[in-house]
Image (cartoon, rainbow, N blue to C red):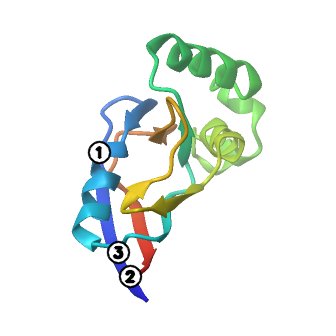
Amino acid sequence: MKTIRRELWFEIPQRRGLINITPQVEDALAESKIAEGLCLVNAMHITASGFINDDEGGLHKDYEKWLEQLAPHEPINQYQHNLTGEDNADAHLKRQIMGREVVVAVTQGKLDLGPWEQIFYGEFDGRRRKRVLIKIIGE
């Protein structure tokens, strides 16, 4: 069995953002030369997410609105976590909703994604450097 490990680093200038990272994951897979296996994509921070969905601008705006309704940023004093001096409790909750990681099958050297599926990095408390782990295992 072969493995490859890569890191992607992001520093989103805004509080929130979604980035399609499918091309970077595909590059890591091509470099690995793995034909059959699994690919893990993991946001390595507690206020960021890895998820799969459609790369469509209206859907991204819907995510922003929906997540803000579920876990609004303000007023920041509504969260116990923010009593520690933080202002990012909502980002922790948004990450919990969107998930930490995705695992995608690798078949014949390609990510086995469905129609329109893309891999995303979701940032919910930006303005600092964070990383995403790509780990591919297989033959």
Q: Secondary structure at mark 2?
A: strand
Q: Which residue is mark 2?
A: 3
Residue 81 or 21: which is nearer the viewer? Answer: 21
Instruction: Give the image location of residue 94, x and y in percent.
Output: 65, 38
Q: Residue at position x 60%, y 54% from top? A: 100
Q: Amino acid at mark 2?
A: Thr
Report the amino acid beneath label 1. Pro
| Left or right for 125, reference 73 | left
Q: Could one spot residue 33 in this view of the protein?
A: yes
Between 48 and 19, the one lying in front of the other is 19
Q: Where 71 falls versus 85 (above or below)?
A: above
- Residue at position x 57%, y 20% from top? 64
User: Could you say which quadrant of the image residue 97 lies in?
Assistant: top right
Q: Earlier in the sequence, mark 3 or mark 1?
A: 3
Q: Are marks 3 and 1 in contact (CB under 8 Å)?
A: no
Which percent across, then down, holds residue 133? 41, 64
Residue indicated by mark 1 = 23
| 73, above or below 23, in the image | above
Point out the frontmost of discs 3 and 2. 2
Evaluate if marks 3 and 2 touch, with contact meaning CB atoms under 8 Å apart: yes
Residue at 36% x, 62% y: name it.
109
Residue placed under numbered mark 3 in the picture:
5
Please state the horizontal and vertical placement of residue 20, each as a whole percent of the image.
38, 36
Quadrant showing the C terminus: bottom left
Disc 3 marks a residue whose amino acid type is Arg
